[in-house]
Image: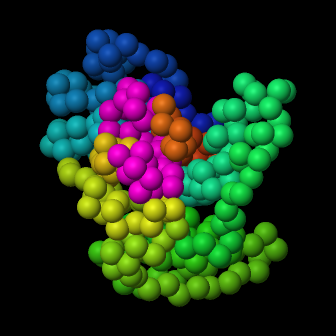
């Protein structure tokens, strides 16, 4: 089969596909030329990230396409139902993102609790003149060990965050309407492992007793965490969202931070991507990143391997 990758594809996946006899074409195509290129060149498969939009208008005109491989964590850029109605299979890499997003969650946690986000801003500006003043200002951070992390959503990513938090000496509480208990296994470099059995808590308990809340839930139509939920958190606590922008009411979050009802926040996803409001970008109590939680080379290798396996199985 001829497979077009419009936004690149890891060598791991390319090698697997070519070894199975498929041709992989790495080529960026302008949106207004995509349909013509695919139909003219008899492309069988399309590998895309969010930068390649596949609305129903485009998918409905694709005459040769047999499948779409989604190389991104979310799928809002693909009209999946339309694709399936047109007998175009849609593949997703379900397992590739957990480690990278979990590590990134811990990174934001450390950045906030040890004032790294603040010192990284101020040191280039004042480090040569006010070193001792900055040292006093950014001293007194908090250690993760002994603190409680509350995980809202306990799927693959939430469980991976739990493992890393436990390894750092944190207590873990979680809320997930679909999971009552979960058995976690921490595996170490020397093949030793430790197992933990965790039980779910109520949402109110997680919110009111945690030192850090981290969101790991599917995309929602309305806010899962709004002003009412934020009010239940400890005033010293923080909240991290690496999940979806609409999970968390950003206006309510800013108000809570400005009124000292919360200690800190960290956002990797935003309601209004790719143009987050200036109130978020300039808030000193927020640790911010441009939706890169899953953006590691290792993740891309896992994505390409997982998609390649699905494509090879589909072609057989």
Q: Report the front residue among 207 and 258.
A: 258
For the point 35% across and 60% down, the residue is: 230
Residue 19: tell me if it is visible.
no
Q: Report the front residue among 65 and 171.
A: 171
Is residue 83 placed above or below 199 in the rendered structure? above
Instruction: State the image quarter where residue 262 is shown.
Output: bottom left
Q: Report the front residue among 278 and 50.
A: 278
| Residue 131 in picture, x, y percent from top left | 83, 35
Q: Is residue 177 magenta?
A: no
Relative horizontal placement of residue 104, taking residue 253 as reference (left or right): right
Tell me the magenta residue range. Answer: 255-281
For the point 46% across and 82% down, the residue is: 182
| Residue 33 in picture, x, y percent from top left | 32, 12
For the point 51% across and 55% down, the residue is: 263
Relative horizontal placement of residue 40, taking residue 4 as reference (left or right): left
| Residue 17 in picture, x, y percent from top left | 54, 41
Q: Report the front residue among 88 and 225.
A: 225
């Amino acid at each position: 089969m001829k497979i077009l990758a419009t936004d690149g594809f890891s060598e791991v996946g390319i090698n697997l596909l070519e070894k199975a006899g498929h041709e992989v074409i790495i080529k960026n195509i302008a949106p207004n030329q995509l349909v013509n290129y695919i139909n003219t060149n008899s492309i069988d498969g399309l590998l895309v990230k969010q930068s390649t939009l596949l609305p129903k208008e485009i998918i409905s005109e694709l005459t040769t396409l047999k499948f779409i491989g989604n190389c991104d964590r979310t799928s809002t850029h693909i009209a999946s139902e339309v694709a399936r109605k047109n007998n175009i299979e849609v593949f997703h890499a379900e397992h590739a993102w957990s480690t990278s997003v979990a590590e990134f969650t811990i990174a934001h946690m450390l950045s906030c609790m040890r004032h790294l986000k603040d010192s990284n801003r101020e040191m280039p500006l004042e480090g040569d003149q006010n070193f001792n003043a900055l040292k006093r200002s950014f001293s007194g951070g908090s250690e993760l060990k002994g603190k409680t992390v509350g995980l809202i959503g306990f799927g693959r990513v939430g469980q991976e965050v739990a493992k890393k938090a436990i390894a750092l000496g944190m207590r873990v509480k979680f809320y997930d309407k679909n999971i009552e208990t979960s058995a976690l296994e921490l595996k170490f470099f020397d093949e030793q492992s430790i197992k933990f059995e965790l039980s779910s808590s109520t949402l109110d308990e997680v919110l009111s007793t945690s030192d850090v809340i981290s969101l790991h839930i599917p995309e929602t139509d309305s806010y899962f965490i709004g002003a009412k939920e934020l009010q239940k958190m400890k005033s010293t606590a923080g909240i991290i969202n690496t999940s979806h922008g609409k999970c968390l009411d950003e206006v309510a979050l800013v108000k809570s931070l400005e009124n000292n009802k919360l200690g800190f926040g960290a956002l990797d996803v935003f309601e209004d991507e790719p143009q987050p409001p200036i109130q978020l970008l300039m808030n000193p109590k927020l640790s911010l990143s441009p939706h890169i939680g899953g953006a590691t080379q290792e993740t891309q290798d896992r994505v390409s391997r997982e998609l390649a396996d699905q494509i090879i199985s589909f072609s057989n």
